[in-house]
Image (cartoon, rainbow, N blue to C red):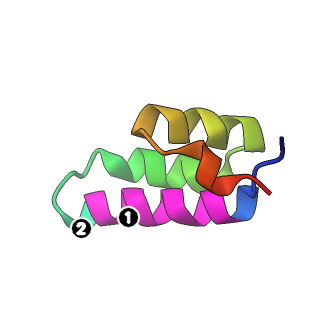
Amino acid sequence: MEIDVSRLRDDLKDYYGTAVFSGMLAAVIELTQAESASPRELVDMAQRAGFELGRYLT
């Protein structure tokens, strides 16, 4: 099973960026982490955020 890491990273950045602009300033930390996270860290972040990882399988 391979994950499209680039797409996952983009979606996480969109997710946390939207949260920041909605007033959840703590999401700035996650947004910054998503920009530089390793593939494994991205998967962990996505799971914590409730993402359906099956959408990112290649």
Q: Is 4 situated above or below 42?
A: below
Q: CA distance from mark 2 to mark 1?
A: 6 Å
How many callouts does the rendering have? 2
- Please report the residue visible at 37 percent of the width from the left and 53 percent of the height from the top: 28
Q: Is residue 17 magenta?
A: yes
Q: Is residue 3 magenta?
A: no
Under mark 2, the amino acid is Phe
Judged from the image, the secondary structure of the residue bearing numbered disc 1 is helix
Name the mark on residue 17.
Answer: 1
> Are circles 2 and 1 on residues that touch, CB within 8 Å?
yes
Residue beneath label 2, please? 21
Q: Is residue 52 left or right of residue 24?
A: right
Residue 41 figure quarter: top right
| Secondary structure predominantly adopted by residues drawn in magenta | helix
The quadrant of the picture occupied by the C terminus is bottom right
Label 2 CA crowd tier, 10 Å (few <14, some 14–19, many 20+): few
**Residue 32 position in % (x across, y down):** 52, 53
- Please report the residue visible at 66 percent of the width from the left and 65 percent of the height from the top: 7
Judged from the image, the secondary structure of the residue bearing numbered disc 2 is helix
**Residue 13 position in % (x across, y down):** 50, 62
- Please report the residue visible at 28 percent of the width from the left and 60 percent of the height from the top: 20
Q: Is residue 53 left or right of residue 50?
A: right
The quadrant of the picture occupied by the N terminus is top right
Name the mark on residue 58.
Answer: none
Q: Is residue 18 left or right of residue 30?
A: left
Magenta residues?
A: 7-19
Q: Is residue 53 left or right of residue 47?
A: right
**Residue 17 position in % (x across, y down):** 37, 64
Q: Is 53 situated above or below 17?
A: above
